[in-house]
Amino acid sequence: MSRVRLGRWLLVIPMGLLAVATIYPLLFTANVAMKTRREYILDRFSLADSLRFENISTAWTSIGMGRYTANSILVVGCSVFLLLLFGSMAGFALSQLRFRGSTALFIGCLAALFIPFQVIMVPLARVMADSGLVDTYPGLILAYVAQFLPFTVFLMTSYYKTIPAEIVDAARIDGNTVYGVYRRIMLPLGAPALLSVGILNTLFCWNDVLISLLLMPSADHRTLMVGVTSLRGQYSEDIPTFASGVLIAAIPVLAVYLFLQRQIADGVAAGSTKG
Amino acid sequence: MTIGKSLPSVRSASAGRAGGVPPSAPPPRDRAVSRRAAGGRRAEQLAPFVLVAPAVLILVLLRLWPLLLGVNFSFTGDGDRDGAMVGFANYVDLLHDPLFQQALRNVGLLVLLLPVAVAIPGLLATFIYLRVPGHRFYRSVYFFPAVLSPVIVGAIFNLLLSFDGPVNVVLSSVGIGPVDWLGDPDVAMFAVVGVHVWATFGMALVVFLAGFATLDAALLDAARVDGASLAQVIWHVIIPSLSRTIQFVFVTTMIGMLTSMFGLLYVMTSGGPEGSTYLPEYYIWIQQGQMNRPALASAASTVLFVIMLVVGLLQLKLLRRAGRED
């Protein structure tokens, strides 16, 4: 027994080192963002001598990280709202209502889950160009909705299946229409699933670079992640400003993670166990 | 219709609906309700279709239609032969393109590295499940990089792995010469894959832990009482009981390697040096976006899709066979 105890304590060393390796890169970046160029060149590891936010404000204003952040918030906000709306509507219909073709539809959704974006990106770019949606906010929002809808419908359907049919029946006997049941029963009852699916979709859309790069070519419309990629060429000499840009892009995700860690992990786990 | 017949199995709970009344006709309680029900009956019957319509429309127009279009597209020409059918010419071009060959070789490398990428989170999840001191802390720390965008991860490691960057500073202080992590064709791909594993092992870890939650603790206790070592417990108890989870992690990790490394490649190496870090997804992007050869890119897309299907099916088969032998 004591040997097992000792073994466990020995494991703490590699696991602790791995934990450091997991957090340190971001701490390093945050530290560099506070330094002057001179400080960085002299010593890469020393702590910045003061909390200096000049680099960050340079990145925010003159590189346009502020503009890119606003673009990202607009696009991600609209996309997630539409995903949750359409996903919960379809999830309700597929789980609680009987109609011709519902099984086929659900299987179709599952199949769509396995079509990666890279496989359809060329023709999608052409469809978008033909309909005049390239380099527009609605175009990018539609592309995000299409990309993450199968996952959303799948999880919402699985969640709504756990709601007993009696609840729906009772609401109908009280004189609710199908739409009334959706609005008054399904939306409130689905809140936990909507929250965790919403957080995951927010992360997916916020973190995307390929779709945005493909459909939003002009500098004015760049989302934040594309903005970060554009830092690379321009600021490869000015490391502290580069690090500031990266930090600006990472902070919102960090904040979400610190507050909603549980929901994120639960969402990932739900996606895996229901698969 | 067969679809109609198979419906009851989907919603078996509907058998228990009050008095077997069809959902579209709730029992009227008074005249007003009955009049409204009669008037709204048609609308009510259409309701399920209205509810699924936005999702179906978007999926058909922006996923299914492009998929078909793309396969068709890959048999047409580029440039001045735009729209003309060229048979398998694009596929022949692909196989002769050294960059695409390199991309395929790199896919092979990913397949070889896959067991490592699955074993690391698997082992860590085992330790956390066995309650290593501080397991809650590790769980939340390890998951953290998984929420960061590949672009941010790539940018951070660009900084860390640059030739005069901090990693080489540390290495040279212990006497190991500077390694050109992202500039040496023999090293760059390993560096990028390493960063990808760093960024995603937390995701697989959470999936493994969800699998562990379904594990029968009595089995572990029994093995313990019989004096089994940790390695024996893992091999004879944990792996067989978690075969479904392991299977799932294998498939999702491979899909992740094939479809979510674009951000890293784009930021860290741009496919270089000397094309050594090309993957099919990056090749598709370059041909579509930079080289203006969308038909060739479509052919590469189709090849990528087939690779994913084959890899997925092969893994399922192998793992199923391994499961049967146990």
Image (spheres, rainbow, N blue to C red):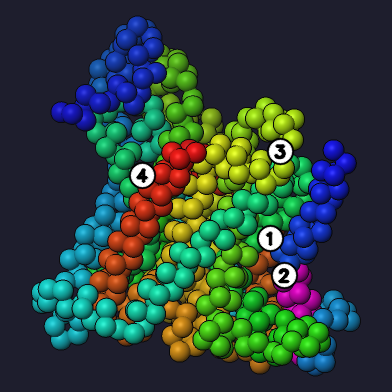
Residue that mark 2 sits on: A26
Helix, strand or loop at mark 1: helix
Are dots 1 and 3 in contact, CB under 8 Å? Answer: no
Residue type at mark 1 is: Leu
A104 is higher (above) or lower (below) than B273: above
Q: Are marks 3 and 4 on the same chain?
A: no
Residue that mark 4 sits on: A110
Residue that mark 3 sits on: B228
Residue type at mark 2 is: Leu
Residue type at mark 4 is: Leu
Number of numbered discs visible in the structure rendering: 4
Q: Nearer the viewer, residue B205 or A114?
A: B205
Residue A170, how many percent across, how many down? 45, 15
- Quadrant of the rendering where the N terminus of chain A is positioned: top right
Q: Separation of disc 3 and disc 4 at Cα?
A: 41 Å
Instruction: Read off the chain for label 2.
Output: A
Residue that mark 1 sits on: A254
Look at discs 3 and 4 and give the one toward the viewer. 3
Label 2 neighbourhood size at 10 Å, few (<14), some (14-19), many (20+)? Answer: many
Q: Which residues are magenta?
A: A24-37
Q: Residue at x 26, y 54 (%)?
A: B64
Instruction: Read off the chain for label 1.
Output: A
A154 is higher (above) or lower (below) than B109: above
Q: Nearer the viewer, residue B123 or A24?
A: B123
Left or right of B19? Residue A33 is right
